[in-house]
Image: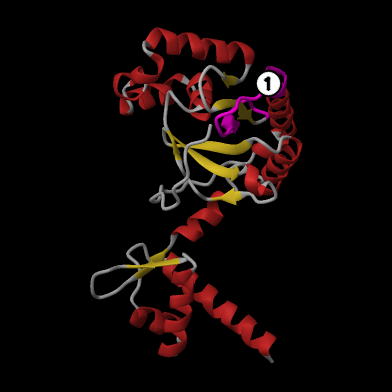
Amino acid sequence: MAQSQSVQSLHRALDILESIATSPAGMTLQELSERTRLKNTTLFNLARTLADRGYLEKTHTRPIRYGLGASVEALNRGTAFGSGAAIDESLLKLAEEHPQWRFITAEAEGVDVLCDRLIEPSRKNVVIRGSRTWLPPYTSASSLCHLAFWPSHPRKQCETLYPFAMYGAGYWGSAQKLESAIAKVREVGFVDIHDRDPHRVAVPLFNRNNALKGSLGASFPGDSSPSSSERQSVIDALLAESKRLLPFLDRQRPQSQSIPHETSLSPVS
């Protein structure tokens, strides 16, 4: 009996989500009640549960309206790299082999490079998804991957939105040094920042059509530094995983809108 009620509640929750998805302006509880034919108490409790889990958001002005929440968008973005399971497998494998390192995947949303997945040394069996932390241009290894391998148009857009003088000069000193670094990245096929802490490396993720889909990065947290052989071992591992992921990156990313970054995680690579 309890199982049957749970299934019924799930169906009702899906009815609510599907109804709201058809209304860009959101819906009031009264409108939802008319659409779903649910009792007010049932509707209120389900809407509150969905809002608590982030699947619904409600306005702070009256009449209160409900719209789809960030958790729905996060589920949608789980397919950004084609197969989320394959990406998770790569991160878990890397963390197991190199437990002192932090690993991330990143992707571009417009000209912003965002952290899509993260695995910390302290929780190497847990893949953190959906943080969407902004990775600054010019100073993040993942962002440098995109600057190096983007077509000219998105790179120019990024440089217009984030002028080097404001966002990169303090780090690189001159635009010539940045260009030399980007040329080196294109030559060797990866980013390797080891002359300042934290040590960071990243490799581009291409699909089989040679389209840039994102990047796979790592950083060595803390004050200590990895040996050159260990750093090279991590780079080799990243490159190997990027090749393994090729067939999983052909799927087109669904179009989506950006959402506020509610989880605060330090840019890591």
Q: Which residues are magenta?
A: 208-232
Q: Is residue 120 magenta?
A: no
Q: Considering depth in this image, is 252 or 67 the residue closer to the camera?
A: 67
Left or right, 190 with reference to 53: right
Q: Which residue is mark 1?
A: 227
Residue 69: x, y in percent?
Answer: 43, 62
Residue 245: x, y in percent?
Answer: 71, 35
How crowded is the residue under tag 1: few (<14 C-alpha within 10 Å), some, or many (20+)? few
Residue 250: x, y in percent?
Answer: 65, 37
Residue 249: x, y in percent?
Answer: 65, 37
Residue drawn where x is 41% and y is 53% of the image: 262
Instruction: Name the quadrant containing residue 6.
Output: bottom right
- Residue type marked 1: Ser
Q: Is residue 216 magenta?
A: yes
Q: Is residue 72 above or below residue 58?
A: above
Residue drawn where x is 27% and y is 69% of the image: 60
Residue drawn where x is 70% and y is 50% of the image: 125
Instruction: Name the quadrant containing residue 157.
Output: top left
Q: Considering depth in this image, is 176 or 151 the residue closer to the camera?
A: 176
* Residue 78 visible, this orientation: no
The colour scheme used here is secondary structure
Furthest-left residue in this view: 62
Q: Secondary structure at mark 1?
A: loop
* Residue 229 visible, this orientation: yes
